[in-house]
Image (cartoon, rainbow, N blue to C red):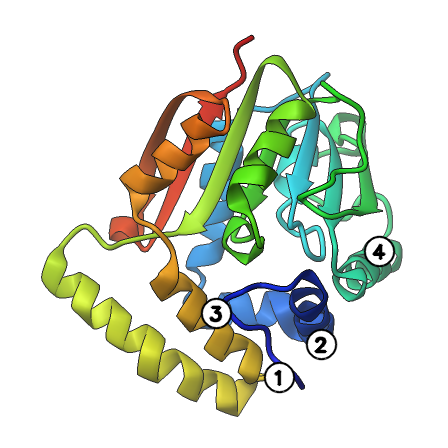
């Protein structure tokens, strides 16, 4: 499989994710030692979406992250530019039935799947109360443009939540983490993944991504206000939140 490079050409990134769609959620659990589930719950708490809210979950992949929002009663659109990911998510949803997420059917929000590019979102202005993107902003060729597009489709007073790999806040541990990314993660992927090249790209893209404060600055440069962040797992992941204020 041809892996994506750090110039992040959309076609290459989409093809790479198409290739790993079938085992994507399993590999996320394995490589994060189950921490990804805690990260998803933290994103849902920070987003604070509930009954009557409309959420756009970008880079949603198979829609697993979107279920945290529908379980709270919000309607959610899972948007991704990998058709393979979306097909895997639709298939899983159809296979398990309408009540497969947590909570009662009466409290469940609606979940829809839409193919779309974060640089040119196929939605009208001010369509959503909350826009989230988890582990996807670093895969976009122009993060600033993507953040501006997210602002465009968010209503005035609405929220942005970005969950992304970040910089460990304790320097000696950060060195160990970088070593894990460069050596251990690719070794695990070679044994467990069908397309280990994708996980080599993962390690490189994490290493190349800006730290927490720099990302907060990027968010505010795109027109959002009051950007702040919360470190998870000592900064392996950071969740940034901001709001649209006209």
Q: Residue furthest bottom?
A: 191
Residue that mark 1 sits on: 195
> Could you tell me which quadrant the C terminus lies in?
top right
The answer for how far apart the CA atoms under marks 4 and 1 are is 22 Å
Residue that mark 2 sits on: 19
Q: Position of residue 103 (x, y in %)?
A: 69, 36
Q: Position of residue 224 (x, y in %)?
A: 48, 22
Q: Is residue 71 visible?
A: no
The answer for how far apart the CA atoms under marks 3 and 1 are is 12 Å
The residue lying at 74 percent from left, 27 percent from top is: 107
Q: In this image, 64 relative to 168: left or right?
A: right
Q: Earlier in the sequence, mark 2 or mark 1?
A: 2
Decide: few, some or many residues near mark 2? Use Cα within 10 Å; few <14, some 14-19, many ≥20: some
Camera-side residue of 119 and 134? 119
Q: Secondary structure under badge 1?
A: loop
Q: Is residue 106 visible?
A: yes
Q: Secondary structure under badge 3?
A: helix
The answer for how far apart the CA atoms under marks 3 and 2 are is 14 Å
The answer for how far apart the CA atoms under marks 2 and 1 are is 7 Å
Q: Secondary structure under badge 2?
A: helix
The residue lying at 52 percent from left, 11 percent from top is: 245
Are the residues flagged by discs 2 and 1 in contact, CB closer than 8 Å? Answer: yes
| Quarter occupied by residue 185 | bottom left
Residue 90's tag is 4
Q: In this image, 146 relative to 125: left or right?
A: left
Residue that mark 3 sits on: 202
Q: Earlier in the sequence, mark 4 or mark 3?
A: 4
């Amino acid at each position: 499989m041809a892996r994506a490079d750090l110039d992040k050409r959309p076609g290459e990134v989409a093809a790479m994710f198409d290739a790993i769609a079938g085992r994507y959620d399993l590999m996320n659990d394995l490589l994060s030692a189950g921490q990804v589930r805690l990260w998803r719950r933290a994103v849902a708490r920070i987003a604070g979406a509930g009954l009557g809210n409309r959420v756009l979950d970008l880079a949603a992949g198979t829609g697993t992250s979107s279920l945290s929002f529908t379980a709270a009663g919000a309607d959610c659109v899972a948007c991704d530019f990998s058709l393979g990911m979306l097909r895997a998510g639709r298939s899983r949803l159809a296979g398990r039935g309408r009540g497969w997420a947590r909570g009662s059917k009466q409290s469940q929000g609606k979940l829809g799947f839409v193919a779309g590019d974060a640089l040119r979102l196929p939605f009208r202005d001010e369509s959503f109360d909350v826009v989230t993107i988890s582990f996807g902003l670093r895969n976009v060729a122009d993060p600033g443009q993507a953040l501006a597009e997210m602002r465009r489709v968010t209503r005035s007073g609405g929220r942005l939540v970005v969950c992304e790999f970040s910089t460990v806040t304790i320097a000696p541990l950060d060195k160990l983490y970088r070593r894990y990314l460069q050596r251990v993660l690719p070794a695990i992927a070679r044994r467990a993944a069908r397309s280990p090249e994708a996980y080599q790209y993962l390690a490189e893209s994490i290493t190349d991504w800006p730290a927490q404060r720099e990302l907060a600055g990027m968010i505010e440069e795109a027109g959002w206000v009051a950007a702040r962040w919360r470190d998870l797992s000592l900064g392996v992941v950071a969740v940034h939140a901001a709001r649209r204020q006209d």
